Image (cartoon, rainbow, N blue to C red):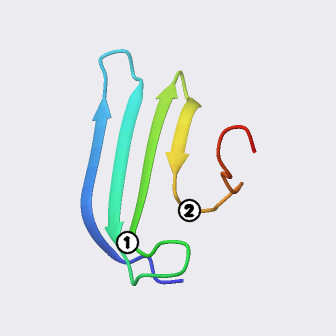
Amino acid sequence: MDKGKLIKHVKVVEDTGNIIEVKLRQIEPTDDKPHGYKYSLVYVVKGKRVIGYDNNLLFYLFKGVGK
């Protein structure tokens, strides 16, 4: 799979050693990414990922509140 064109990559290493990293790539639009972008965010504390967020895979289908 083509990784696409890197639009933005920011990596911040805090004084404590914690890491914040954000990546944004432009890709060919697909059914699951019709906007044509892939993104990821990670926050690493003491070498362990405590927050990770991306649109790489669709894990569930949101069907609305109360349905």
Provide the residue designation for mark 2.
Answer: 56
Residue beneath the point at 29% across and 68% down:
6
Provide the residue designation for mark 1.
Answer: 35
Residue farthest along the top direction in this orientation: 16
- Looking at the picture, how far across and down is residue 2, in whole percent? 46, 83
Q: Vertical placement of 10 versus 31: above or below?
A: above
Dot 2 surroundings within 10 Å: few (below 14), some, or many (20 or more)?
few
- Looking at the picture, how far across and down is residue 57, in whole percent? 63, 62
Residue beneath the point at 33% across and 59% down:
24
User: Between 67 and 9, which is closer to the camera in this rendering?
Assistant: 67
- Looking at the picture, how far across and down is residue 22, in whole percent? 35, 46
Residue beneath the point at 68% across and 52% down:
63
Q: Vertical placement of 2 versus 66: above or below?
A: below
Residue beneath the point at 52% across and 44% down:
53
Q: Amino acid at mark 2?
A: Asn
Q: Which badge, 2 or 1, is on the more N-terminal residue? A: 1
**Helix, strand or loop for disc 2:** loop
| Left or right of residue 66, residue 12 in this image | left
**Helix, strand or loop for disc 1:** loop
Q: CA distance from mark 2 to mark 1?
A: 13 Å
The label on residue 6 is none
Q: Amino acid at mark 1?
A: His
Circle 2 or circle 1, nearest the eye: 1
Q: Can you tell which quarter of the image residue 8 is in? A: bottom left
Is the C-beta separation of discs 2 and 1 under 8 Å? no
